[in-house]
Image (cartoon, rainbow, N blue to C red):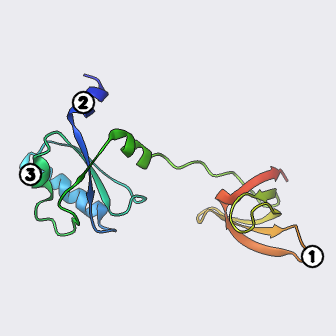
Amino acid sequence: MSISNQTQKNKIYAISVVGGYEEKIALIFAERAQSLKLDIKSIVYSEDLKGTVIVEIGDPKDLFYLIRGIKNVKRRRPIAISLQDVIKLLKPPTALPTIAKGQLIEVIGGPFKGMKGRIVEVYATRNEADITLLEGDSKIVVTIPTEYIKVTEEK
């Protein structure tokens, strides 16, 4: 049996929960599904998707038993969603440009869009960089997200 045939039988639901409790509720769902022998295929949550736990279930009747009595579930009526919607929500992040000190750049977003500058410092943990703007009379150093930077020239 192919994957597409399996997911056609299974239903996918988005369950609204209190923000910050997604992981805890997903673990509670997993324990409850195992102890009650519910027809749960998968349970997914993402830090990027606040307040939502996604559940794939074979028998929709089991959904009632899964969420019954759990304190931090907001709505008792889950929303049915398609597999394509789940794939869109959980797509991997795009790769950020590799930048280093001394490179000439162009700002492609934010309030400094269109300006040219030079990289002074790169903060990889925060995905930000300090740049010196080359336009204007004074040299201004600003911190901008690396996603707003396009490298125009190497060192």
Residue 40 figure quarter:
top left
Which residue is under mark 2? 6
Amino acid type of disc 1?
Answer: Asp
Does label 3 or label 2 sit earlier along the sequence?
2
Q: Is residue 41 visible?
A: yes
> How many angstroms separate mark 2 from mark 1 (CA)?
64 Å
| Residue appearing at x 59%, y 66% in the figure | 126
Residue 47 against residue 130 in the figure, above or below? above
Q: Is residue 90 visible?
A: no
Q: Nearer the viewer, mark 3 or mark 2?
A: 2
| Residue appearing at x 40%, y 60% in the figure | 47
Which residue is under mark 3? 35
Q: Where's residue 137, x and y in %?
A: 92, 76
| Residue appearing at x 52%, y 50% in the figure | 93
The numbered disc on residue 137 is 1
Residue 125 figure quarter:
bottom right
Residue 75 figure quarter:
bottom left
Amino acid type of disc 2?
Answer: Gln
Amino acid type of disc 3?
Answer: Ser
The single residue placed furthest to the right in the displayed view is 137
* Label 1 packing within 10 angstroms: few (<14), some (14-19), many (20+): few
The numbered disc on residue 52 is none
Q: Where's residue 116, x and y in %?
A: 83, 61
> How many angstroms separate mark 3 from mark 2 (CA)?
23 Å
Q: Secondary structure at mark 3?
A: helix
* Label 2 packing within 10 angstroms: few (<14), some (14-19), many (20+): few
The single residue placed furthest to the top in the displayed view is 1
Q: Where's residue 144, x and y in %?
A: 68, 67
> How many angstroms separate mark 1 from mark 3 (CA)?
70 Å
Q: Secondary structure at mark 2?
A: helix
